[in-house]
Each structure stands twice: as C-alpha cells, then as structure tokens.
Image: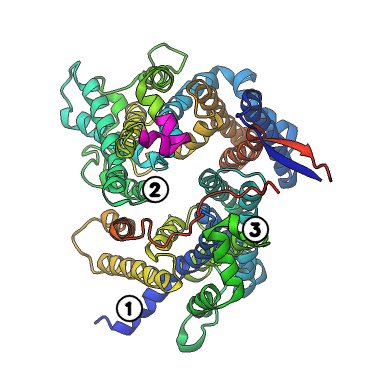
Amino acid sequence: MIQLVPRSEVSTLWQFLTPVLAVLATMVAGGLLFWVMGYDPVAAIKTIFWDPLFGMASSYSRPQLLVKAAPLILIASGLAIGFRAGIWNIGAEGQYIIGAICGAAVALAAYPSEGMWIFPAMVVAGAAGGWAWGMIPATLRNWFGASEILVSLMLVYVAQRVAAWMAFGPMKNPEGFGFPGSRNLQQYPSASNPELIAGTGTHWGVVAAAVAVLATWFLMSRHIRGFHIRTAGLAPRAARFAGVKPETLVAFCLGLSGALAGMAGLFEVAGPAGQITDKIGVGYGFTAIIVAFLGRLHPVGILLAGLLLALTYIGGELAQLMLNLPAATVQVFQGMMLFFLLGFDLLTRFKIQRRVVA
Amino acid sequence: MIDPLSIFLLLLSASTPILFAALGELIVERAGVLNLGVEGMMITGALAGFAVAYVSGSPFLGFAAAATGGAAVSLLFAVLTQFLLANQVASGLALTLFGLGLAALFGKPFEGVKAPPMIPGPFRINWIVWLGLVMVPLIWWFLNRSRGGLILRGVGENHDAAHALGYNVRLVRIGAIAFGGAMAGIGGAFISIATVLQWTEGMTAGAGWIALAIVVFSNWTATGVLVGAWLFGGVTVLQLRLQAAGVKVPVQLLSMAPYLATIIVLVLISARQKFSRRAGGAAPGSLGQNFHALR
C-alpha cells in the first residue's frame, strides 16, 4: 500500500513541475479525446499548441497571442491576490462586462468630438465600473456575511443582461440600420485602442497587463498589504491577532480585481471587439481563474499561464478552421488543465511513500 | 384571466430543476463537502438526458441517463477532493467549467431537434415533478430519522470524530457526492427534456449556482430547500408573466429578476445567520474542509 505523508513545507520543486505536468497530461488526455471523436490526435495537438507559433499561418496568429493573453493576464493578476487571501471573486466576467459598458459609455457620450482626454477617461470609467461591480459582493459580504462566491457569480448573469439591454436599447447605434450593438469605437479615433506597434498585437491592454504583473509582484512580495493578504490566507487567526481587518482585505481584493477586470473589458471593447453587443463577454473572466491557478497565483506564473491559455484559444480557432474541430474543444481543454493541475498539486503538499506494515 | 391553479402548476415546473439540484447539494454539504460544480453536473445531465431521450424515444430512459451522467462527472470532483485532497472551491469551479465545455462539445449533433413527448402523471403534472416533491420528505426522513443520515451528518459536522468512531469518512463523502451529481443531472435534464424540449449550449443558465444559494437559504434543511425552490419558481413565473403581459420594461431587465432575487434572498438569510447566536447558521462544522487520516 502507498501512503501520503504531509510535507512540513510546500515543495518548491514540485510547485514548478506540477503546472508543466498538468499541461502535458492535458495534451495526452486531449489527444485521447480527439482519437475517440475520430480525429488524428497528433495533428490536433500540433495544430493547437505548435502551429499558431511556428506553423504556416503564424504571421497572423502570433500577434493574436498578445491580444488574447492581455485580458487574461490583467484579470488573473487581480483574482490571484484575492485567491491568496481566500477571497473568491469568481464574477470577473461580470466586472469585465460592466467595465466595457462604462468605458464605452464615456466614448459614446463624447462622440463625435475628438480630444486627448477621451481615451484616458474611458480607462478610468472602465476601471471604476469594474471596481463598483466588484464592490457589490464585497459590501454584501462585509455587512451581511453573504457568500462573495455566489453573489459575484450571480452578478455575471445580471451583467450579461445589462449588456444585452445596452446593445438593443440605450447604446444602440442610431446609424446602425436597426442592427443591435453600439457604434464601432475602432472607427472613432479618440476612443479607439489601436495596435501600437504594427504586427505585434500590442495595444494599451497589453501595456496595462505588463504593468499589472509588475505592480502585483511588488504588492505581494514587497508591500505590507501583500504580506497581510498572504498571512490572512495561510493563517486567518494569526492575521487577525496582527491587526489585519478581514473586511478591509475583502474590499481591497474584490475592488482591485474588479477594477482590473473592468479595465480589461474596456481595452477589449475599444480595441479588438470594437463595440458593445450582447455577446461582449466571451468568457475571459472564467478562463482567467484557470490562468491564476495554473500560474500558481504568482505574477510571473500568471504571465506564462496567460500566454499558454491564449495559445489554446488561437490554436483552437485554427483547429476549427483546419481540422473542423468543434469550438467547444478549447473549453474542454482549459477545464482539463485545471483538473490535472489541482490533482497534481497533491505532490507539492504530500510525499508518497510505501506504507511500512509494523 | 389568470387562474391561480395554472400559475401554481407553472411554479412547480419552474422550481423542479432547482429543487433536484439543491436537494442533492444539501446531502453533499451535510456530509461536509462543498461542491461548486452543480452547474457543470446539471448541464451534463441536461445533455446526457436529452441525447438518450432523443435517440431512444423514451424520456424516462433519458432521466436515468442524466442521473448516471451527473454522477459520473461528480466522481471527477470526488477523486480530486477525496483522494488527491485538492481545494474544494477550485475543484468545484473546475467541474463547472469542464462540464460546460464537455456538454457543448458533445451537444452539437443534438442542436435543433425536439425531445420526445412525456406522458403526464397524476393531475397532468409531470412525473419528475412528482418525484421531486416526494424526494423532499424522503430526504428529510433520511437526514433526521435514519441511522445513515446520522452517520452522514456526523461526517459533516466533525470528520475527525466520525473517523475515530470507525466510520469511513471518504466513502460516505464519495457516496454523497455521487448522489448530488445524480440529482443535479436529473434537474438539468428536466430543463432539456420537459421544459425547453430541446438542447442548447449553456441552457442551464446559472440554475446550478442558484441551487447552491438555495442550500444556504434553506439553512441546510430539506423543507427550507423546498421553500427556496418555490420562491425561485415564483419569481421566474412572475417575470415570464410580466413579459407576456407586455409590461413597459425591457425584456433583458425583467430576465434579471431570478438572479437579483437570489442575491436578495442570500443577503437576507446571511444577515439572519450572521446576527443570530450561532455564527454561520446551521452550516455543517466541517463544510469545505478536506479530511486526511494520518492513521
């Protein structure tokens, strides 16, 4: 028989190895799935993980990597901070949608005037919208003890309906020939979020994601607030004795992750998406949860995990085009990755030994 | 005119998916496990049930398949949390994301076809609605009057004590998780087979999460779950009625009602639990904590 023996300290080696193992296991299990479904497993895995970077269409898909990774990294950086403290914001998708709507509202209000102030004001509005949407579960938890998990998740569905209402009602393009959806912000120079360096996919959201990685690294490893967050996650009682107010942390973590998700939404609506539609939320808020875990809740890990998950999006689209693989494959892949990661995580906390029968 | 009886029948139907899922989760949580994967298990059941019902022509076979499918995916969660000791919140989320993806992947061939008709039960009420109503006293009896229920609650309140008494904590919890999966599967299949009559991607639309909120609302009792499910069903029916009556409020805003109502109810009940004497209400003592026996 084998036996699990708890480690006295979390194994650093396995912390690095388990995400890699999880990705490899996902490739194997995913290959099996494709084989069962009647596709060539090797070709499918190669199309998803290799071709977007080095294949024939890579000149098109490589810039897409940053476009897709930026919102994931931006959102996951915020989520990871809360997860470290045991504060579960799983409604980032809603905060992302509200951020996009608030940012777009500034642009649509200013239309058609041009000015340097418009885009910065949109970023502020996007962040504020996401922050406010995140503060709802925070406040309800602090005042009434309502579960932030359930409230933040419910608010995703509410946000989706707000987006649909906006697209069909108040924000509908008056020159849109009756089609739902707002004006296209890509065609409004002062409000658009264009590619900054041609051919790289770099837009302001990518810049913001890079800043977020640096800032959260500083916060978590060099700032007293980060120390409090880590303490509260590992030893809530100890944190309380040290004078850390749980309410402050709840508000800080949900507010910050909401603001970052809101900004991600704004950069998306002003850039790649272009307009507010009822489908403005494409699931980045949920995928970012996987990014946060796969990145071990560490800023650098999140950067790498964000790029990898972005790759699965692009590779999935490519596989859809080349091999006629269903679009939902990517979702299954991402879910599997989280499963395997959580499973392999055992190795960071336990040693596996043969049981000695006395 | 609207007659109260037909409204009540609509309410019963609207509350059934949530009732099944929440009763299942009630058992899971009373065993001390927090499974946030209800939405994933429901959508799996919705697809498995619809597919089998469509292929075989028998809705009842469909519901059996839904229960099996829901239980099968719930075992993924069971392996992660009971053997690999993974964080329950994260594992539940993973189950939801995975289930939604899996159902979307295998559901493609079933888009656009219609479910076979069901033979209504007594009083022209669906058999599954009846089954749900019967499950409420059964689960109440199991939890409060049976030996098995006592063991289950013991495992949920204090897993170390239950282990010391010689009960197999892991086995009890795996059984509870599988039961929760089967119930969620049936609940999901009720949406696809009996309500909407077809399969669409993501059709459970948060019902699993509402079920989780209703377990909190119920203060972890079977009767509370029934009240919560009916409350939710009532809000849904009211919202649909207002849409049909052509109220001058955008449809998108009206359709927020169930989600907003869930938040409001959750806040009210959490506040009551917070300010009452026992902090956390009647939540099981070991809820959400993993158990690892060193000996």
Where is residue A235 drawn, in percent x and y?
Answer: 46, 36
Q: Are marks 1 and 2 in contact (CB under 8 Å)?
A: no
Name the residue at 41% across, 72% down: B226
Q: Which mark is residue B7?
A: 1
Mark closer to the observer (2, 3): 3
Decide which of tag 1 and tag 3 comes sooner along the chain. Answer: 1
Name the residue at 59% across, 30% down: A315
Within 10 Å of disc 3 (Cα), the crowding (few <14, some 14-19, many 20+) is few
Nearest the viewer among A122 and B170 is B170
Where is residue B47 drawn, in percent x and y?
Answer: 58, 59
The type of residue carrying mark 3 is: Ala
Provide the chain ID for the residue under circle 3. B
What are the residue bounds of the magenta stretch?
A229-241
Q: Is residue A106 left or right of residue B279?
A: left
Q: Residue furthest top?
A: A197
Mark 3: which secondary structure?
Answer: helix
Pointer 3 residue: B164
Q: Residue furthest right?
A: A357
Pointer 2 residue: A153
